[in-house]
Image (tube, helix red, strand yellow):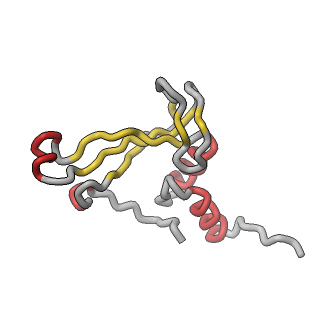
């Protein structure tokens, strides 16, 4: 199971070069020069569509990069489309920590835990 009740986030414990993300608590409009892809379902998201945006940062690879750019610095944002964003925000709202790259697995885990999963009729 990939669904977890604990979200531990401390960038100082991340390995060099490792990235992490953080998000706003809701939907926003995609404001961009080009359409973006949903990081979960890979669908193209049109400009002006509702998305959940994840600002990302990366830990410096070494001391030289850290002196030039700082310990952590911004990298390209990731986005979830309206459907995937709804799943993500819903699971977050009820207290689960989810992986934005595997929301389908997390949703299936939730259905199994909660009893919502229906067994197919024989």
In the rendered image, residue 43, in percent from the top left (x then y), is placed at 61, 42
Q: State the image coordinates of residue 87 (x, y, percent, origin top left).
A: 60, 50
Q: In the rendered view, tell whether residue 43 sits above or below residue 3.
A: above
Q: Position of residue 27 (x, y in %)?
A: 53, 36
Quarter of the figure that contains the C terminus: bottom right
- The spot of residue 53 in percent (x, y) is 46, 39
Residue pictured at 52% horizontal, 65% vertical: 3
Residue 1 position by quadrant: bottom right
Residue positioned most to the bottom: 122
Q: Is residue 52 above or below residue 111?
A: above
Judge left or right: residue 85 versus residue 56.
Answer: right
- Relative to 98, say whether 35 is above or below: above
Q: Is residue 73 left or right of residue 48?
A: left
Report whether 122 appears left or right of 93.
right
The residue positioned farthest toward the right in the image shown: 122
Q: How many marks overall?
A: 0
Q: Which residue is at 34% across, 51% downward? A: 20
The residue sitting at 33% across, 40% down in the picture is 75
Q: Nearer the viewer, residue 39 or 48?
A: 39
């Amino acid at each position: 199971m990939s669904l977890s009740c604990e979200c531990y986030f401390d960038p100082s414990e991340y390995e060099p070069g490792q990235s992490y993300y953080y998000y706003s608590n809701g939907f926003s409009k995609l404001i961009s020069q080009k359409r973006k892809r949903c990081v979960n379902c890979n669908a193209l998201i049109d400009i002006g569509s509702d998305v959940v945006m994840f600002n990302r940062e990366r830990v410096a690879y070494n001391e030289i990069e850290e002196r030039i750019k700082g310990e952590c610095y911004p990298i390209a944002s990731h986005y979830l489309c309206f459907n995937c964003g709804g799943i993500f925000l819903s699971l977050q709202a009820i207290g689960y920590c989810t992986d934005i790259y595997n929301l389908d697995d997390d949703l299936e885990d939730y259905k199994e835990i909660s009893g919502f999963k229906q067994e197919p009729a024989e």
